[in-house]
Image (spheres, rainbow, N blue to C red):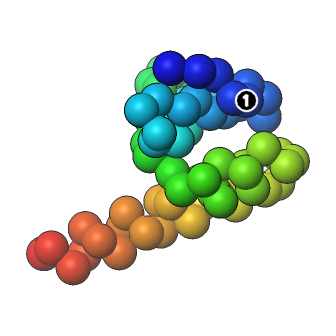
């Protein structure tokens, strides 16, 4: 695993050709979460704190949509 980026409260790594984004998903307690992102999302998240936040929101919305489809 290689670390590509560590700023803006996120960590982006590459492992076996997959891009992984880790961030604190906790409220009162630190709870790290790691999710797979596309190369484009990884590149965008590295541009600025605003872009990183936008990528996280996009991913959460996508996950929420997928969860609703399964119900």
Residue 67 appearing in the image: yes
Q: In the shown orientation, is residue 34 left or right of residue 51? A: left
Image point (85%, 49%), residue name: 47
Location of residue 6 by image quarter: top right
Q: In the shown orientation, is residue 2 left or right of residue 66? A: right
Residue 37 x, y percent position in the rendering: 51, 51
| Residue found at the far front of this picture | 17
Residue 46 x, y percent position in the rendering: 78, 44
Location of residue 64 by image quarter: bottom left
Residue 23 appearing in the image: no
Image point (75%, 56%), residue name: 44
The vertical placement of 35 against 69, above or below, is: above
Q: Secondary structure at mark 1?
A: strand
Q: Mark 1 Cα within 10 Å, few/some/many (few <14, many 20+)?
A: some
- The residue labelled by disc 1 is 5
Residue 5 x, y percent position in the rendering: 73, 29
Q: In terms of depth relative to the viewer, which is nearer, 56 or 15?
A: 15
């Amino acid at each position: 695993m290689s670390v590509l980026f560590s700023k803006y409260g996120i960590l982006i790594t590459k492992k076996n050709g997959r891009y992984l984004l880790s961030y604190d998903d906790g409220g009162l307690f630190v709870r790290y979460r790691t999710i797979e992102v596309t190369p484009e999302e990884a590149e965008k998240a590295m541009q600025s704190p605003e872009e990183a936040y936008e990528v996280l929101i996009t991913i959460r919305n996508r996950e929420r949509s997928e969860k609703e489809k399964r119900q």
